[in-house]
Each structure stands twice: as structure tokens, then as C-alpha cells.
Image (tube, rainbow, N blue to C red):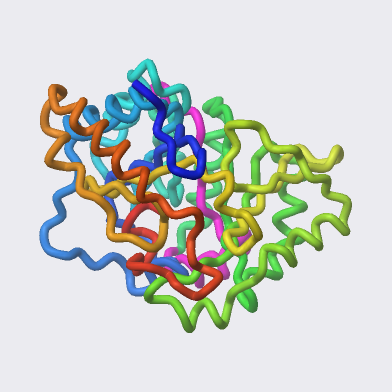
């Protein structure tokens, strides 16, 4: 079966699969009022997930990141990891988490087949961490990162959204931390969403400014590998860790797009922004529907835009990033 490809020659081997939009943190840039359910949630079942993974595996998907909300809130999270890892077409199983369950479960998830993990840590100051996330769980999350390193994960990444007049002063502390800690630290430029115009205006910090500062301090740009995502990566010979910058407002950011998204309720999203998504759930009930599902995926890829429209201030229908897994 031919690989998923759009009209601009971009091939898609990376799926971000949300399994819940519930989150127990209240991050100011994402869910400032906390999670508010819209009726009784009906998220993808294990059977639907297995059929979804099988279809994407047949059309060239090699990496799946299990996302949320907070994906580890699902009691069957380990089973989900195992389903993805057991598919022979999927070479990399990853997740993004706020880390609150990581200390207790890192080894179990590793044994189930999880190999890469991103932990959101927006400040190394416990008080600022609490101010941004709404949860006093800094020590718990840091213990989880230690547990992930001990469990043997191929790659442990820490995600931080740097925010002007909030945690931007943490940059030196972050850089000092990774001098002796072998993690990939990723700074994510704040993106404007439907609910966040005023917040964006107050706290947006341009990724280009952070890049200039790093280069001035001796960080060296690493040439991207073919499987790398949109991050621009930097390293220094005297640091064990690396830095990645995700800068959605940078020129040609979308040129290397290699990922698709499926929401926790089974909608395909071609982009984090701009569109409502295409329902796949009616074709996730039985394995014999796979050919029709694959045909639908190929058909939808012809609709993918060349770029997002964030530069024009158009944020699409996405109200907050937790709704389709960031």
C-alpha cells in the first residue's frame, strides 16, 4: 500500500494519536480553567485503536506518539502502549505526558514497549511551576524524569513553553541543568489558539530571539536527520543534553511537516490548526474495513494545505491544544 503523501510531496510517517482530551493540570497557556467535559466522554476503545494503528502502519507510519490531554490518565494506558508496540510496522512508540504518574510507572511502560517520552516541565522553580500548571507537583514530576532515565528510555525529552514575563528568566537554569543531564530540552514557542489572544499578546516570546541567544552562547546547530520533526536542534560539546527549538512562526516551518493527528474521538486532523477534522470512527470497528479506511486517508491528504495561517493571526477551530493532542 502506498505511503501517505500530500500534493506538495510531503510524506507522513508520524502519527500523533490522542487517546483522551482529559487533563489533570491547568496550564495557563492551554487549559487555564481546567478540563471541562462536554457531555460524557467517549474516547477511542482498544479495538478502535488497534484498527487505527494497523491502517496507519500499512500506509507508511513508523512512529506513533500517544498523546492527550494527559494520556496516562487512561487506566488502560499500558495496554495502548502494548497495542502500538506489537504492530510490526511501527518502529518508534512515544508519548507526551505531564509526568505525574511517571515515577511509579516508567519501568512498566518501558516493558510494554514505550521507548521515547516527552515530559512537560515549564519551570525549574517549583513556585513558577505551580503558577503555570496550577498543580504543586514539581518534585513528583522531577522524580519521574529520573525514573525514566533509569528505566532505559532511548530518549527522554523535556518540553517547556517559554513565556515572556513568566518563566523566560528560567533559561540559564535550564541550560545549567542539561550540562550534566542527558536529556533533550525543547523550548516550544507559544502559539495563539482560539481562546488565547490576550494571553498570546502578553506572553509570546519569539523563538528566533531564543535561537540568537543560544548561538551567541556557543550552541551549535545540528543538521536534521530524516526522521526529525520540526525542532531545530543545538548542542555543545561540554553539555550532555541537547536543545531543540520548535518555532511555528519561523519561515518554512511547515515545509518539513511529516505528521498527522487523530483526536481522542477518532477525527483525522491534517494540521494542528485551521480545520474541523475528518471523522474516521465509523471505519474503526472491524479489521475488514481497513481498505476503505486507507482509501479515506489517501483522499483526505489531497486537502492538506501547504502551510498553517498563524502568521496572519488565523488560528482555525482549535480552541485549546489539549483538544487534539498538541
Indicate the quadrant where residue 150 lies. Answer: top right
Residue 72 seen from this side: no
Above or below, comparing residue 36 to residue 80 in the picture: below
Report x, y in % for residue 259.
45, 42
Q: Quadrant of the C terminus?
A: bottom left
Q: Is residue 237 left or right of residue 293?
A: right
Q: How many marks?
A: 0
211 or 256, nearer to the observer: 256
Q: Is residue 12 left or right of residue 283?
A: right
Q: Residue at x 60, y 37 (%)?
A: 228
Task: Say whether residue 261 is magenta.
Answer: no
Above or below, comparing residue 129 to residue 185 in the picture: below
145 or 202, nearer to the observer: 202
Q: Residue at x 50, y 44 (%)?
A: 8
Task: Say whether residue 130 is magenta.
Answer: yes
Residue 56 seen from this side: yes
Indicate the quadrant where residue 225 lies. Answer: top right
Q: Is residue 240 left or right of residue 153?
A: right
Q: Quadrant of the N terminus?
A: top left
In this picture, which residue range is highlighted in magenta? 111-135
Report x, y in % for residue 91.
46, 22
Report x, y in % for residue 306.
49, 53
Q: Residue at x 29, y 65 (%)?
A: 35
Q: Is residue 134 left or right of residue 287?
A: right
Above or below, comparing residue 294 to residue 216 in the picture: above
Report x, y in % for residue 175.
75, 53
Q: Residue at x 46, y 80 (%)?
A: 197
Amino acid at each position: 500500500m502506498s505511503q501517505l503523501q500530500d500534493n506538495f510531496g510531503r510524506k507522513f510517517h508520524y502519527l500523533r494519536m490522542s487517546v483522551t482530551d482529559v487533563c489533570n493540570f491547568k496550564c495557563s497557556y492551554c487549559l487555564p480553567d481546567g478540563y471541562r467535559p462536554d457531555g460524557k466522554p467517549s474516547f477511542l476503545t482498544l479495538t478502535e485503536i488497534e484498527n487505527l494503528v494497523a491502517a496507519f502502519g500499512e500506509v507508511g507510519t513508523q512512529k506513533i506518539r500517544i498523546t492527550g490531554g494527559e494520556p496516562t490518565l487512561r487506566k488502560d494506558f499500558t495496554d495502548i502502549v502494548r497495542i502500538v508496540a506489537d504492530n510490526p510496522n511501527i518502529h518508534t512508540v512515544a508519548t507526551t505526558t505531564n509526568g505525574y504518574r511517571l515515577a511509579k510507572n516508567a519501568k512498566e511502560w518501558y516493558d510494554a514497549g514505550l521507548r521515547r517520552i516527552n515530559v512537560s516541565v515549564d519551570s525549574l522553580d517549583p513556585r513558577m511551576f505551580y503558577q503555570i500548571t496550577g498543580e504543586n507537583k514539581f518534585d513528583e514530576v522531577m522524580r519521574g524524569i529520573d525514573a525514566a532515565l533509569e528505566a532505559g528510555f532511548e530518549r527522554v525529552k523535556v518540553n517547556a513553553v517559554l513565556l515572556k514575563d513568566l518563566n523566560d528568566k528560567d533559561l540559564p537554569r535550564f541550560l545549567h541543568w542539561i550540562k550534566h543531564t542527558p536529556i533533550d530540552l525543547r523550548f516550544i514557542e507559544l502559539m495563539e489558539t482560539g481562546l488565547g489572544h490576550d494571553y498570546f499578546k502578553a506572553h509570546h516570546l519569539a523563538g528566533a530571539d531564543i535561537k540568537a541567544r543560544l548561538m551567541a552562547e556557543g550552541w551549535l546547530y545540528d543538521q536534521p536527520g530524516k526522521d526529525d520533526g520540526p525542532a531545530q536542534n543545538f548542542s555543545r560539546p561540554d553539555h550532555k543534553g541537547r536543545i531543540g527549538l520548535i518555532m511555528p512562526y519561523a519561515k518554512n516551518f511547515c515545509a518539513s511537516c511529516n505528521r498527522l493527528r487523530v483526536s481522542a474521538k477518532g477525527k483525522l486532523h491534517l494540521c494542528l490548526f485551521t480545520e474541523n477534522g475528518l471523522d474516521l470512527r465509523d471505519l474503526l470497528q472491524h479489521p475488514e474495513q481497513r481498505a476503505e479506511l486507507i482509501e479515506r486517508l489517501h483522499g483526505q491528504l489531497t486537502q492538506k494545505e501547504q502551510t498553517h495561517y498563524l502568521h496572519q493571526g488565523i488560528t482555525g477551530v482549535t480552541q485549546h491544544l489539549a483538544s487534539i493532542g498538541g
